[in-house]
Image: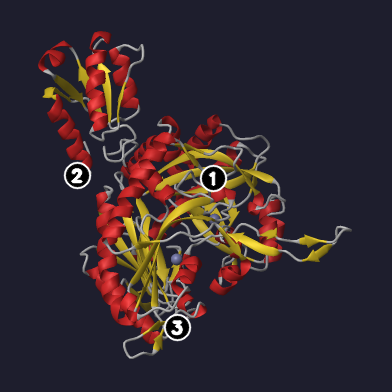
Amino acid sequence: MSQISITVDGKQLSVEADQRPTHIFADNKEIVVCKINGQLKDLWTDLAQGDVVEGILISSPDGLAVLRHSTAHVMAQAVQEVYANTRLGIGPPIKDGFYYDFDPENTFNPDDLTKIESAMRKIIKEGQRFRRRVTTEAEALKELAHEPYKCELIGIKGPAGEEASVEVGGAELTIYDNLGRDGNPVWSDLCRGPHLPSTKHIPAFKLMRTAAAYWRGSEKNPMLQRIYGTAWPSQDELNAYLELLAEAEKRDHRRLGTELDLFSFPEEIGSGLAVFHPKGGIVRRAMEDYSRIRHEEEGYEFVYSPHITKAALFETSGHLQWYADGMYPPMILDEEYNADGTVKRAGQQYYMKPMNCPFHNLIYKSRGRSYRELPLRLFEFGTVYRYEKSGVLHGITRARGFTQDDAHIYCTKEQMVGELDSLLTFVLNLLRDYGLNDFYLELSTKNDEKFVGEDSDWEEATEALRKAATAQNLELVLDEGGAAFYGPKISVQAKDAIGRTWQMSTIQVDFQLPQRFELEFSATDGTRQRPVMIHRALFGSIERFFGVLTEHYSGAFPPWLAPVQAIGIPVADTFADYLGDVIKQMRKAGIRAELDASDDRMQKKVRNAQMQKIPFMVIAGEEDQKAGAVSFRYRDGEQKNGIPIADAIAEIKKVVQERTQV
Ligand SMILES: [Zn+2]
Ligand SMILES: [Zn+2]
């Protein structure tokens, strides 16, 4: 056998020409796929002289995607074994899992998933090899004549869409055969691959749920049945994932929003448009008030702008050129008619605003600006409307109408470095005040294909952002070439109490809008110069941040945010008057306190307070009354007895003031 020379994980090797990656990586069971000359390939791929081979671990992003897509194949094979007359759609990997779309004779029910799972386990146990086979369009159409959806994919010449690209869209048209113990194909699927070497490389999986889905996402197409599943490199990781899902479900802000009476989405108003109830209103106002105070301390000036504007403003800003899809359609106003009903004077188009920036630029431009006024920091709780597809709406974290805590900073080039640095510190400290404290930063840099402005400005701004980020001693992830065309950006990613990452604040440098709006200031030497503009939203939107905090705290807000901070629960009716007076004193001291004067027994009142996640239950019985004291019961069930009234008030006020959790 002749020898070939290849590079494996950076090392030169001489191997026999019939060696494949599966042999080369035989010692490491964690390697399930590989890159050959930079391309993701099956471990069964033939090698050639000079190939550069890199083993890919099952736990890496590529490895996980291959694991999950291969598990989707096994699921499709199992479905066709159990329900012979099921036609196949597509089956891509997705975040944390996979799905496959089917056209079954009957709608799947939960019992079907159990049956399909056990058929899958049999296939996995058999260790069927995934074999790649190159085919032609004509052959594939003949072979897959019984699979109309697959045939449709074969016929697509252009891009098949992101999800269908796992089936077709490679350089060659390929079919993957699953080989049984005797080496003969037992099942085949049109697929671009790559796949795991065999089905036994699927360590842990679970089918999650079914859903209806239109073929290739269009309502003009037939409705198919989608099955979602998940797959992981180990049973432990699968268990951890399922636990996380259960925990996330308990914390889901949409569910807590109803249980705690915080907000709702009335059908009569429309999708993605929330109303805040009194209790949600208190949390929201506490969030806003604190933000307002901190911004004032940092030298921000508060401005207001209307919700709608003539189209021309969004032409100047460029929104109508590149953001029109995300905007509500225009209203035509001020149209004038002749007596016969024909239009005498055409109306004006008005748009709901999707962003506040253009308005702030007009405030900047309302008069001449001097270098002495810079940096000028304009802040607005600005409500914006974006026409999000209904499929992506998610409670108050992804809505169609929301209020940004939006600021625009205008400064000189010289001020930019210092401004970005203090801005990032301010942003992170404020997020910490709300109880988030596990962050990493992401720096999005120039896309060389698409950008406006001078290279030197980009370099300077990117360097300034990098320096500001590095000074925070936080993990910094580079998003190379990921910046919008108008400037580099830092985003703050925050981890919540159960380890999920949320994108929070963004700090975006903008070289474009000052140009488009011809913003100027007069410099020290009297020349007219262009300011640098920085967009900055700290919460993103108040609603979204509200949703994130609700899930982070699982609804058990720290006292400074809690709608009700203290609830009075008398041990028996006889102590209601005494406790009512204590509660009155608390209210006078500025504490959001209520007395539960209902007919419920004490234990029921305690349970209700626990359900409402009220931080302080203030309890009074005979001993308390005699001593002029109360008892505290906390959300975790712990109790502190015999606290003199004045001390009780002081303790609640202290934790509210310090914004600490109890
Ligand atoms: Zn496939
Ligand atoms: Zn902006």
Task: Kindly give the residue lying farthest to the right in the view shown.
Answer: 340
- The answer to which of marks 1 and 2 sits earlier in the sequence is 1
Q: Do we see residue 505 in this rendering?
A: yes
Q: Quadrant of the C terminus?
A: top left
Q: Residues within 10 Å of mark 3 (few under 14, many from 20)?
A: some
Up the image or down, 188 lies above or below 22; here it is above
Label 3, on which residue?
A: 453
User: What whole-number distance in Å separates the C-alpha atoms at marks 1 and 3?
Assistant: 37 Å
Instruction: Tell me the kind of residue under disc 3.
Output: Gly
Q: Is mark 3 within 8 Å of ligand 2?
A: no
Q: Is mark 1 within 8 Å of ligand 2?
A: no
For numbered disc 3, what is the local secondary structure?
Answer: loop
Q: Residues within 10 Å of mark 2 (few under 14, many from 20)?
A: few
Q: Residues within 10 Å of mark 1 (few under 14, many from 20)?
A: many
Up the image or down, 140 lies above or below 650; here it is below
Instruction: Tell me the kind of residue under disc 1.
Output: Leu
Label 2, on which residue?
A: 658
Q: Quadrant of residue 168?
A: bottom right
Left or right for 372, reference 103? left
Considering depth in this image, is 96 or 568 the residue closer to the camera? 568
User: What whole-number distance in Å separates the C-alpha atoms at marks 1 and 2?
Assistant: 33 Å
Considering depth in this image, is 368 or 470 the residue closer to the camera? 368
Provide residue 533's location: percent of width, then percent of height. Answer: 40, 74
Instruction: Tell me the kind of residue under disc 2.
Output: Glu
Label 1, on which residue?
A: 273
